[in-house]
Image: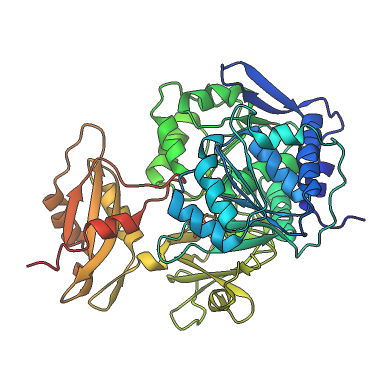
Amino acid sequence: MNSSNLFSALRAAFPQDLDATAVFATAPDGAPLNYSWRDLDRASACIANLLASLDLPASSRIAVQVEKSVEAMLLYLAVLRAGHVFLPLNTAYQKAEIEYFIGNAEPAVVVCSPENFGWVSKIAFQAGTKSVFTLGTERDGSLLERAAHCSDVHAPVARGRDDMAAILYTSGTTGRSKGAMLTHGNLLSNALVLKDYWGWQADDVLIHALPIYHAHGLFVGVHGALINGSPMVWFNKFNPRAAIAAFPRATVFMGVPTLYVRMLAEPALTRQAAAHMRLFISGSAPLLVDTFAAWQERTGHTILERYGMSETVMLCSNPYRADARYQGQSERRGGTVGFPLPGTGLRVVDDAGAVLPAGEIGHIQVRGPSVFKGYWRMPEKTAQEFAEGGWFKTGDVGQQDARGYVTIVGRSKDLIISGGFNVYPAEIESFINELPGVAESAVVGVPHADFGEVGVAVVVPRAGARPDAAAIVARLRDTLAHFKVPRRCFVADALPRNTMGKVQKNLLREQYRDLFLKA
Ligand code: AMP
């Protein structure tokens, strides 16, 4: 029978009543637009049949750069169903980037927004793509027009655990972006572990407000709801007021830290507004301890922070309930990403690859069923990123304390080496964030003739506050070893962030690159 196709596992979890609502969405005019489980099944079957009619070789790449919509999710399900490989692309990508991705992945099919058809199809056809379809946010575009003529019955194509289901291009702030190959087995095993670890319940309803070109919204969000047969309240774009207004009819929310910050700015966020919710989950970027505490105070809920990456799906999570593997601890600790998930191995090693004892900071390596197959068409890069024994080098620096909690200190490429000493930006940032008038900060390393690198701090004030940059540096000098103290500090209105809420330290490094080089 048909084996390990992820779609079959998701389909098997649909509730018995296929006429029940699976997705509560909103039409462009603001009217409710609901999709039943039967709708998900039939519409994804139509699209899968359209793909089948193209007679593509198995595991063809289907590259998709469209605005978020329920139909875009249906396209994802259809690609799985048809046995092909889903390749989502951030909607922010421009021509040169799309050229690279299409040239590198050689997709058989490209689906783009109707307004981008002209330039995207040109790139695609030049690269040998067979078909280019369009998909808009109002159920418009050629994909659905063509799919409407196809049968709404489709048997999922047999796929093995090790067959590719998706390629996610890493955000790649240094060098070329790499395509992480994720298999049906990677994705299904992670979805099942999270279902159990986060205690998904029969009456759960997920608020889905994240983009679906990224692992967070696509795999953690969509799989999380579907594998539990739980409906989603669906937002194509995040709006803090609308999200809070949805709390009374939902139970689970997943967000990147900036979404929490934006909801905290809304007076409507109260204990009462959040009373029906069961679980708030955060990830993709570090959640400030301040945000964690403010959320607790305002709503009475303790955000559960977890950690993962495109190459591995989810790796660590704070506990939802007592974790027997870690002395029955159930505390969700702000500033940490909790414990390695069941089945995930995690170790912290030094520069030479030797395993470090608890509490020491080093490079985080992981292995387990959710760790990807490798980088698409980059066998050498793939080999470099795995240590002996199948340990994947995450590129994150952190520690695991004696109780088992893992803390991420930063990306190894963000590490500052000043005069031969390692400086971990997150440590300095956490000191700066405690200072009066500071909302948040970022510390980056910039070239320096004597020290190799020195730190530069960029500080964002709290509303109404005017922290003094020189005074911040002076305070740090009293608190920290001198090699750790940033040489300069700048006050800025905001930190540059990408759409997943990650601070773009590469942009800050670029901005301040010449600070100490020019006389
Ligand atoms: P991506 O592949 O875009 O999902 O980015 C993965 C990276 O995001 C990880 O390697 C971490 O550096 C970072 N990240 C994800 N979750 C967290 C978290 N909870 N705390 C700190 N960093 C995180």
The residue lying at 45 percent from left, 60 percent from top is: 172
The reply to whether residue 145 is visible in this rendering is yes
Quarter holding the C terminus?
bottom left
Residue 508 vertical placement versus 206 (above, below): below
Report the front residue among 325 and 422: 422
Instruction: Evaluate whether residue 336 shows in this view.
Output: no
In depth, the one of 109 and 173 nearer the eye is 109
Q: How is the image coloured?
A: rainbow
Find the residue positioned furthest to the right.
Answer: 1
> What's the residue at 51%, 32% (across, down)?
237
Count the labels in the image. Answer: 0
Picture quarter with the N terminus: bottom right
- Say left or right for 407 vs 515: right
Res 258 quadrant in image:
top left
The quarter of the picture where residue 392 lies is bottom right
Q: x%, y% of residue 57?
A: 77, 59
Residue located at (73% from left, 40% from top):
226
Q: Is residue 310 left or right of residue 495?
A: right
Task: Locate residue 397, reporting x and y percent.
Answer: 44, 67
Q: Is residue 43 left or right of residue 259?
A: right
Camera-nearest residue between 415 and 294: 415
Residue 356: percent from left, percent from top = 49, 77
Q: Is residue 117 above or below residue 369?
A: above
Considering depth in this image, is 453 or 168 the residue closer to the camera?
168
**Which residue is rendered at x = 31% and y = 46% of the image?**
495
Tell whether 482 sits left or right of 183. left
Q: Is residue 301 above or below residue 440?
A: above
Give x and y (percent) for residue 245: 54, 21
Which residue in the rendered view is the most extreme toward the left?
519
Res 21 quadrant in image: top right
